[in-house]
């Protein structure tokens, strides 16, 4: 598991209040029932804090799955 | 009415924007039958105005707009104030971007029924406000934006006429396309003009006035209520909506309490007949602010009290 995915998993556990939640690059709102528009923004703001980055609204709206979020974080963080 | 359009929209959202599905389901539960009627009406005009891909385009815009709103609200929770403080900032960052504005307006168009609390406002508008207007009303709409509210009024009142004024050329273009799609364009005229300049128009010309979600975009919102009072005929009525502690990126004036809007109406010669303040059922975790939308049905007073 990549460092980014590991840290992002902790963010998901916090936001969805579920320490058993397993995420992969393919995970999307179709796989997690409570991943709605508000939870998405909560997730994004916590990820911004965890990784020290800031996203635009267009980037946030366009994310389709965890893999795209990881790529965006790594791009923003210059990894 | 095309009964295939709503299923097409719902299917597209479920497939392409599953995070938005829950909010849409909440909106449908407000009043399933009326939701369907409003949705079919708005989607019918949308497809006539934009063509076959209009539903997908507007749904994408709706999701982008809703994300803008939610993200701005999350940042507001941290900062405690709106992002922009002046019209000049908002104009430079948002209103001057023509392509962005076009999509933004189509996104807002769908919030009239896809946001549950806005469905409630739409029902008040149709069932109470439009029901009170005389059949032959001369209606003024300030800042029609996408034009859906005005088209709805003209559809309900087949002898009414509407004059709309908006500062945005994109809004004039889209509102005109919606009234054409609704088959009421021969009774609607739209002019590019700043709302606050309308005090230069003749006084007491409107039997009904519509002004939705403009007041929070102004640096001096009390001036807008003076315009409303100027344009309404004695004892004629208006439908005004505004946003409170709702940090959309182009909101400037931060209303915190419903009474602030009521007071501004009363101070400008308007009697408040009815109010509705609604917010979303779901909020950000530990939210201090509830992003509310408030509707007021007001009447131009002739004297001190009524």
Image (spheres, coloured by chain):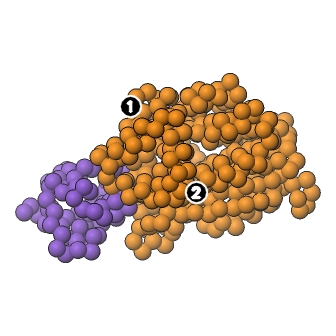
Chain colours: A purple, B orange
Residue B120, label in figure: 2
Answer above or below: position of A2 versus B201.
Answer: below
Residue A24 as seen in the image, left or right of residue B206:
left
Task: Give the percent coordinates (x, y) of residue B103.
Answer: 45, 38
Residue B72, label in figure: none
Q: Residue at x 49, y 28 (%)?
A: B48
Quarter of the figure that contains the C terminus of chain B: bottom right
Q: Residue at x 70, y 67 (%)?
A: B259
Camera-side residue of A25 and A48? A25
Q: Label 2 marks which chain's residue? A: B
Task: Give the percent coordinates (x, y) of residue B172.
Answer: 60, 31
Camera-side residue of B170 and B237? B237
Residue A40 as seen in the image, left or right of residue B30:
left
Answer above or below: position of B123 versus B287.
Answer: above
Q: Label 1 marks which chain's residue? A: B
Residue located farthest toward the top when viewing the structure as drawn: B186
- Judging by the rendered image, the residue that carries numbered circle 1 is B53
Answer above or below: position of B293 versus B224.
Answer: below
Judging from the image, what secondary structure is the residue with disc 1 in? loop
Q: Residue at x 64, y 26 (%)?
A: B185
Judging from the image, what secondary structure is the residue with disc 2 in? helix
Q: Is residue B234 visible?
A: yes
Q: Quadrant of residue B157?
A: top right
Task: Give the percent coordinates (x, y) of residue B274.
Answer: 73, 60
């Amino acid at each position: 598991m990549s460092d980014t995915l590991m840290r992002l998993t902790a963010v998901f556990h916090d936001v969805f209040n579920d320490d058993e939640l397993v995420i992969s690059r393919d995970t999307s709102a179709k796989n997690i029932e409570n991943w709605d528009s508000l939870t998405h923004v909560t997730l994004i703001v916590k990820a911004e804090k965890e990784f020290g980055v800031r996203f635009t609204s267009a980037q946030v709206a366009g994310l389709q799955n965890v893999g795209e979020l990881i790529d965006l974080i790594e791009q923003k963080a210059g990894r | 009415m095309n009964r295939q359009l709503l299923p097409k929209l719902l299917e597209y959202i479920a497939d392409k924007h599953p995070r938005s599905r829950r909010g849409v389901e909440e909106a449908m539960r407000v009043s399933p039958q009326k939701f369907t009627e409003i949705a079919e009406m708005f989607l019918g005009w949308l497809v006539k105005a934009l063509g076959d891909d209009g539903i997908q385009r507007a749904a994408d815009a709706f999701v982008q707009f809703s994300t803008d709103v939610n993200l701005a609200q999350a940042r507001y929770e941290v900062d405690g104030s709106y992002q922009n403080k002046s019209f000049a900032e908002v104009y430079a960052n948002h209103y001057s971007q023509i392509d962005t504005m076009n999509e933004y307006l189509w996104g807002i168009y769908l919030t009239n029924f896809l946001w549950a609390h806005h469905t409630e406002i739409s029902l008040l508008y149709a069932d109470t406000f439009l029901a009170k207007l005389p059949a032959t009303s001369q209606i003024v709409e300030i800042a029609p934006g996408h034009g859906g509210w005005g088209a709805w009024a003209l559809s309900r009142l087949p002898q009414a006429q509407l004059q709309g004024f908006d500062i945005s050329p994109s809004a004039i273009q889209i509102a005109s396309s919606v009234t054409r799609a609704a088959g009421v364009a021969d009774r609607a005229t739209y002019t590019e003009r700043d709302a606050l300049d309308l005090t230069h128009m003749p006084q007491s010309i409107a039997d009904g006035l519509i002004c939705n979600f403009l007041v929070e975009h102004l640096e001096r919102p009390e001036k807008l209520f003076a315009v409303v009072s100027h344009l309404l005929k004695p004892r004629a009525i208006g439908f005004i909506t505004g946003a409170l502690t709702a940090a959309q990126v182009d909101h400037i004036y931060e209303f915190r309490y419903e009474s602030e809007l009521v007071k501004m109406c009363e101070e400008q010669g308007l009697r408040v007949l009815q109010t509705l303040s609604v917010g979303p059922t779901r909020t950000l975790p530990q939210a201090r602010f509830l992003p509310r939308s408030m509707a007021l049905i007001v009447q131009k007073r002739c004297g001190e009290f009524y």
